Image (cartoon, coloured by chain):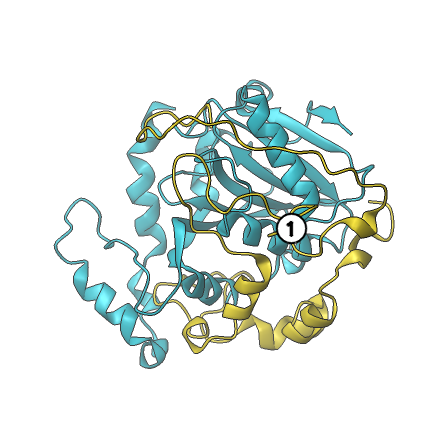
Chain colours: A cyan, B yellow
Amino acid sequence: MSGWHLSHEILKDDDSGDHDQNEENGTQKDGEKEKNDRDKPQSSTKRKAVVPGPAEHPLQYNYTFWYSRRTPGRPTSSQSYEQNIKQIGTFASVEQFWRFYSHMVRPGDLTGHSDFHLFKEGIKPMWEDDANKNGGKWIIRLRKGLASRCWENLILAMLGEQFMVGEEICGAVVSVRFQEDIISIWNKTASDQATTARIRDTLRRVLNLPPNTIMEYKTHTDSIKDNSSFRNTKITL
Amino acid sequence: MSSSGGHQHSQSRAIPTRTVPISDATQLPHDYCTTPGGTLFSTTPGGTRIIYDRKFLLDRRNSPMAQTPPCHLPNIPGVTSPGTMVEDSKVEINNLNNHDRKTAMGDDAQFEMDI
């Protein structure tokens, strides 16, 4: 896994093609233009820092949307996973979040074996990331038809800091699969039981989960061992 | 939080807790900015955090500042649509437009059936 810190910026560049500068320019908010200009001095990253625009509502953290889709027939090594994951964009305010969200399909309308990831800026949605390597995730399996609404409730709770676990939350994922959809929320310290219990209870509340909902926790160490996101989990009721 | 080492120290104090017995789902608050029996704290150990409840976030969606496409949105067919609001085209299918959301605020029907 030693190579992938370097590739962070490469990934970014993949998705930041100039072809995005299209006819939408005319409708850009002034605030965004200002931000673009302000970015120039930064040399280490091509893209300037994302900041809330004037009169926008700042979030506690910046977040980045990612999208991944499994290429059929390929083995899912961490390398090919990394090649298949694309950055959609980073936002710093409530309003900027909606701009992205409103121009992305809902998870329920995704096809194939694909995922949306929403992670704090600087944390890659990979088990091996420094912020994730000692962590784990809560998993909730949903029957088809519920993913869009649950995903929205989950990310609104995360962006609004409803989990009350300090710096522990890393990000959230919705995974569209053949017979079920799965949402998960990742935290930094899998061994911190007070934190994981609080995340579990908040999940139940913000998703309106019925009391008998099965919730599963899996550490990323275990995921790396069996190269699987959702098998061999610890189940709690 | 015990695990959040690395940032500045604040005075150590136990998080106040109390138990509110609930016998029925109807006693649960309707939005998650409140806890049963009232919201306990708006700041967390380690400092004030920027907290928004679901209703506030949803309201901001209608702001003009939230409507324009982000300037670096990559075009991923079937996933992003830089030119149009997804809202407009997909709304009927996925049942998630604003009108729907408002009437379904209670959201209890979500898990009507077993999942």
Left or right of residue A165: residue A138:
right
Please, what is the three-letter code of the amino acid marked with disc 1?
Answer: Gly
Figure check: A141 above or below A86: above
Q: Residue at x 54, y 23 (%)?
A: A190
Left or right of residue A106: residue B24:
right
Task: Name the spot of residue A30 as percent of width and height, x first.
Answer: 28, 75
Q: Chain of mark 1?
A: A
Query: In the image shown, does A70 or A74 lie closer to the viewer?
Result: A70
Name which quarter of the figure residue A57 lies in. bottom left
Figure check: A32 above or below A134: below
Q: Residue at x 54, y 60 (%)?
A: B79
Q: Is residue A232 visible?
A: yes
Name which quarter of the figure residue A156 lies in. bottom right
Q: Which residue is mark 1?
A: A112
Figure check: A115 above or below B107: above
Task: Name the spot of residue B82 as percent of width and height, x first.
Answer: 45, 70
Q: Residue at x 57, y 47 (%)?
A: A115
Q: Is residue A70 visible?
A: no
Is disc 1 placed on a helix, strand or loop? loop
Figure check: A71 above or below A34: above
Mark 1 crowdedness (10 Å alpha carbons): few <14, some 14-19, many ≥20? some
Query: In the image shown, does A232 or A226 lie closer to the viewer?
Result: A232
Task: Name the spot of residue B49 as percent of width and height, x first.
Answer: 42, 46
Query: In the image shown, does B12 or A109 lie closer to the viewer?
Result: B12
Q: Residue at x 82, y 52 (%)?
A: B26
